[in-house]
Image (spheres, rainbow, N blue to C red):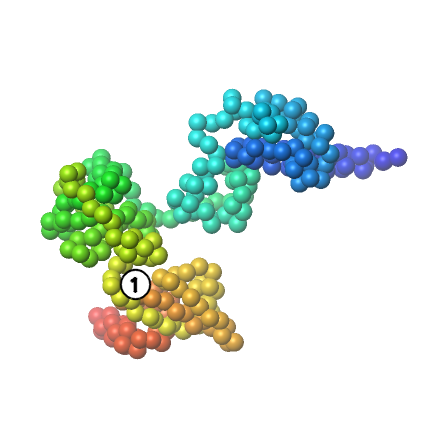
Amino acid sequence: MPTATTTPHRASAKGEKLAQRLSHILALLHQGDSLDKHQLAQAFNVDVRTIERDLGERLHGIAERGPNGHWQLAHAARSTIPTRHLHDYARLAGTERLFPDASLRYLLEQLETPEPKRAMQVQATPQEDLRAQGPHTTHIFALLQDAIEQRHECQFAYKAKPRHAQPYRLIHKNGVWYLAAIEGGLLKNFSVALITELTVNETSRFTPDPAHQDYINAKDDVWFTQGTTEVLLRVAPEVAHYFARRALLPQQQQRADADGSLLVTTHINHPNQLLPVVRYWLPNVRIVKPVQWHEELVAGLRQALAL
C-alpha cells in the first residue's frame, strides 16, 4: 500500500508525463501534421485508448478526426498564419541555429513562458534600421525587391555617380542591407541605404546569369571579386576557442595542432576583409601566408604608433 509521502510524488510524475505528451501532440497539430493514434501510442509507449482520450477528450475542440481516421488541428483552432511558417521565418532571418533545440515544441514552450520567468535572453545584434531613415528608403527597398523578382533593370545614384544595374539579390550581412547587382558586366555590392534616385525600367527585362547566381549563393560575405587569395593564419591556444566555435572569416576552415593552436585557412577577396579581424586579435593571431599581407599589417601598425 503506498504511503502518504509517495502518492503525491507518483501523481506528480504522472501529471508531468501527461503534460509533456499533450504539449508534444499540440506542437505536432499546430505544425500541420496529420496524426495517427497508433503511431502516437507507439511513440509515447502508452495504450491507444490513452491517445484516444488525449485527442478526443483532453484536446476536445482543438483536435478533430479527419475523414481518413487521422487527427488534425480543428479548423476553429487554426491561426491565419500556419505555425510551420515559424521554421521558414527562422531560416529567412538566419536564426535557425540560434537555439540548441530547433523543434517547434521547444519554441512554443519558450513563447508560452512569461518573459520575466524565461531562463534565457537573446542580445540583439546591432543592425541598421532602414525604416528610421524614412519612407523613401523603405520604398526603395520594396522597388528593388520587385525589380529582382521581375528581372527589371534599374538606374540609381550611388556615391554621387549614376548607375545602370541588373539587380540579383538583396543580402543582409553584419546588420547592413546590400544589393548584389551587375554593373558594366561586373558583380558588385551597393549599400541600400546609400541608393538614391532609383528608377526601375519595367520595359526592360534581363536574364540572370546562372554563374553569377551560383557565385552569390556560395558566398558567405558581400565582397564580390573575380579571384580570392588563400590566407593561412596561426591562432594561439589562448583564443583558439573563439575561432573554432564559429567562423569569423569567409570560407573558414581550421586544423587543431598538438600545442592547442589552430592553423586557419580562409579565402579573402580583399585585405580589408582580413586585417581588421587580425588587428582585433593581436598578438594571438599571425598571418603566415601571404607574407606580403603580414608585412603590410606590421607597417600599418608602425605608422599608427608613430602617430
Name the residue at 13% across, 49% down.
163
Count of marks placed on residues: 1
Residue extending farthest to the front is: 68
Residue 152's place in the image compared with 29, above or below, is below
Q: Nearer the viewer, residue 79 or 107?
A: 79
The amino acid sitting under disc 1 is: Gln
Quick one: SS at disc 1? helix
Quarter containing the N terminus: top right
Residue 113's place in the image compared with 298, above or below, is above
Name the residue at 53% across, 49% down.
100
Where does residue 103 sit, x and y in percent of width and height? Answer: 54, 43
Give the class, few, some or many, for how many residues have Cα within 10 Å of label 1's Cα (few <14, many ≥20).
some
Quarter containing the C terminus: bottom left
Where does residue 83 sit, x and y in percent of width and height? Answer: 48, 34
Name the residue at 40% across, 47% down.
94
Which residue is denoted by mark 1 in the rendering?
273
Where does residue 230 sit, x and y in percent of width and height? Answer: 33, 70
Residue 228's place in the image compared with 158, above or below, is below
Report which quarter residue 271 is drawn in: bottom left
Residue 95 can be seen in this image: yes
Where does residue 110 sit, x and y in percent of width and height? Answer: 53, 39
Report which quarter residue 119 is drawn in: top right
